[in-house]
Amino acid sequence: MAARIDLTLDCTDAQLLAEFWKTALGYVDEPPPAPFETREEWFAQFDLPEDDSVEDGAWLCDPDGVGPRLSILKVPEPKTAKNRLHIDVQVPGHGSADERWERVIAESERLVRAGGNVLEEFDRHHIVMADPEGNEFCVAAASV
């Protein structure tokens, strides 16, 4: 059996980034692990510094259980370089190359309205974007 992966994004504002990625991926807040009723209850079990808050993290999941879990965690240091790993947002649908590209453009425009930025466009192939904290990701037509 293959190993499953989770992805973790470091950030300065976990709640802002969580809202962006929920919009981008259609993810939802992951429920707290059993037996905890809330994330606050779960968070309280750890012996963390007083200035740490449950709001300093967000845990997202694919509601269909297919995609990897996404953890978004506040860290003290700023982003300083290009990501060595990035997320590809695959826009679904079939059709001609023009129709697929139109869907990629529409998705990038939707993500700009959600707080993302277009960094570079590779015409008719993919668009490199950044989330509200500068983490790079690509928008492309699904290859399936």
Image (spheres, rainbow, N blue to C red):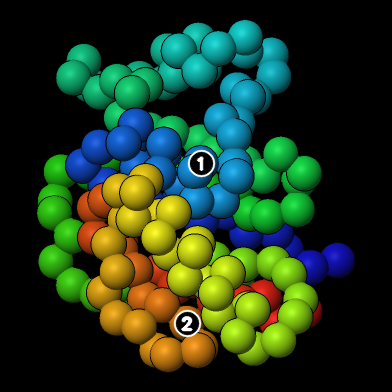
Residue 22: assigned label: 1
Which one is in front, 91 or 84?
A: 91
Q: Residue at x 75, y 53 (%)?
A: 66
Q: Residue at x 31, y 36 (%)?
A: 16
Q: Secondary structure at mark 2?
A: strand
The answer to which quarter of the image holds residue 117 is bottom left
Which one is in front, 79 or 132?
A: 132
Q: Secondary structure at mark 1?
A: helix
Tell me which label, 1 or 2, sits earlier in the chain: 1
Q: How many marks?
A: 2
Quarter of the rendering occupied by the N terminus:
bottom right
Q: Position of residue 74 (x, y in %)?
A: 27, 39
Residue under label 2: 126
The answer to which quarter of the image holds residue 90 is bottom right
Could you tell me how far apart the alpha carbons at marks 1 and 2 are, in whole angstroms? 21 Å
Quarter of the rendering occupied by the C terminus:
bottom right
Q: Position of residue 55 (x, y in %)?
A: 33, 23
Instruction: Answer left or right for 144 relative to 109.
Output: right
Q: Residue at x 55, y 74 (%)?
A: 102
The answer to which quarter of the image holds residue 63 is top right
Instruction: Answer left or right for 137 relative to 66.
Output: left
Q: Position of residue 125 (x, y in %)?
A: 51, 88
Q: Is any part of residue 88 visible from this angle?
A: no
Q: Amino acid at mark 1?
A: Lys
Instruction: Answer left or right for 103 relative to 71.
Output: right
Q: Dot 1, crowdedness within 10 Å: few (<14), some or many (≥20)? A: some
Which one is in front, 45 or 6?
A: 6
Which one is in front, 46 or 8?
A: 8
Q: Is any part of residue 120 visible from this angle?
A: yes
Q: Amino acid at mark 2?
A: His
Q: Dot 2, crowdedness within 10 Å: few (<14), some or many (≥20)? A: many
Q: Residue at x 51, y 41 (%)?
A: 22
